[in-house]
Image (cartoon, grey):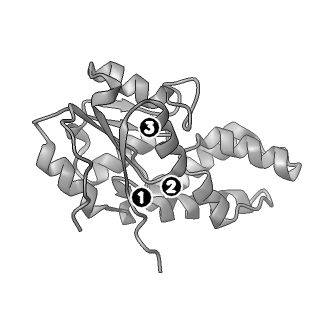
């Protein structure tokens, strides 16, 4: 399916990664469930999707606070990351977005702007064979304030040397759309593939 774009002359495309370029949200959720089950921590699927785009460490800290748990944040993040890496080979690309990457590659610069770690983003893009198409990666740890704050997108625009108003954001999550809007950027919402 061809993803329709807003009208305008865009000088850069900024992409979220998980759920936008790579249909990896099911793998992420499975990795979360396997990891959190060991700690007796509930993480309903609806909440997982509502928090899409938040850094992993923030999610663990928030779950600790909500459920009165004391999970070691760094350990849980590392365990979840390792499980995700094992599940990643089963993830596929999102055709409507891959079409735009293929179509515009070489004409305008691309950045990935993600709440995931740099290791997870590079592994996801590498699994699809498209890592080399991205000029800039802005990942968890590269900014102080995550989405819905505009900082991650503004950082990517700065690194690409493109004015924020000339960037088009591809994003599947509400937090990402809010962040793009706050950054003064046009955005395309990528629909989630239906999971069986």
Q: Residues within 10 Å of mark 2 (few under 14, many from 20)?
A: many
Is residue 96 placed above or below 101 in the rendered structure? Answer: below
Image quarter of residue 184: top left
Q: Quadrant of the N terminus?
A: bottom left
Q: Position of residue 183 (x, y in %)?
A: 44, 30
In contact (CB < 8 Å): disc 2 and disc 1: yes
Q: In this rendered view, identify the residue nearer to me: 70 or 51.
A: 51
Residue 114 picture location, percent across and down: 45, 40
Q: Secondary structure at mark 2?
A: helix
Q: Residues within 10 Å of mark 1 (few under 14, many from 20)?
A: many
- Residue holding disc 3: 180
Q: Residues within 10 Å of mark 3 (few under 14, many from 20)?
A: many
Q: Earlier in the sequence, mark 3 or mark 2?
A: 2
> Foreground residue, 191 or 89?
191
Q: Is residue 158 left or right of residue 9?
A: right
Are discs 3 and 1 less than 8 Å apart at CB? Answer: no
Q: Image point 46% across, 53% down: which residue?
A: 85
Q: Is residue 61 left or right of residue 106?
A: right
CA distance separating discs 3 and 2: 27 Å
**Distance in Å between CA atoms under marks 2 and 1:** 6 Å
**Residue 88, disc:** 1
* Mark 3 or mark 1, whichever is nearer to me: 3
Q: Secondary structure at mark 3?
A: helix
Residue farthest along the right direction in this orientation: 68
Q: Considering only order in the chain, which callout, 1 or 3, is on the residue closer to the N terminus?
A: 1
The image position of residue 153, as x and y in percent, is 42, 31
Name the residue beneath numbered marker 2.
84
Counting from the top left corner in percent of width and height, residue 99 is at 18, 56
Residue 70, above or below 87: above
Task: Name the residue rendered at 23%, 55% in the picture.
Answer: 98
């Amino acid at each position: 399916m061809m993803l329709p774009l807003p009208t305008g002359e865009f000088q850069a495309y900024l992409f979220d990664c998980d759920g936008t370029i790579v249909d990896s949200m099911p793998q992420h959720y499975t990795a979360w469930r396997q990891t959190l089950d060991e700690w007796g921590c509930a993480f309903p699927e609806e909440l997982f999707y509502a928090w899409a785009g938040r850094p992993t460490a923030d999610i663990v800290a928030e779950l600790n606070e909500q459920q009165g748990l004391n999970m070691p944040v760094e350990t849980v993040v590392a365990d979840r990351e390792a499980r995700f890496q094992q599940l990643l080979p089963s993830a596929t690309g999102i055709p409507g977005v891959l079409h735009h990457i293929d179509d515009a590659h070489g004409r305008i610069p691309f950045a990935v702007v993600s709440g995931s770690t740099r290791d997870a983003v590079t592994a996801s893009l590498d699994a699809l064979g498209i890592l080399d198409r991205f000029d800039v990666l802005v990942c968890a740890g590269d900014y102080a304030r995550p989405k819905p704050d505009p900082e991650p997108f503004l950082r990517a625009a700065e690194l690409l040397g493109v004015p924020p108003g000339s960037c088009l954001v591809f994003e599947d999550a509400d937090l990402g759309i809010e962040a793009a809007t706050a950054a003064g950027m046009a955005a395309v919402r990528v629909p989630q593939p239906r999971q069986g």
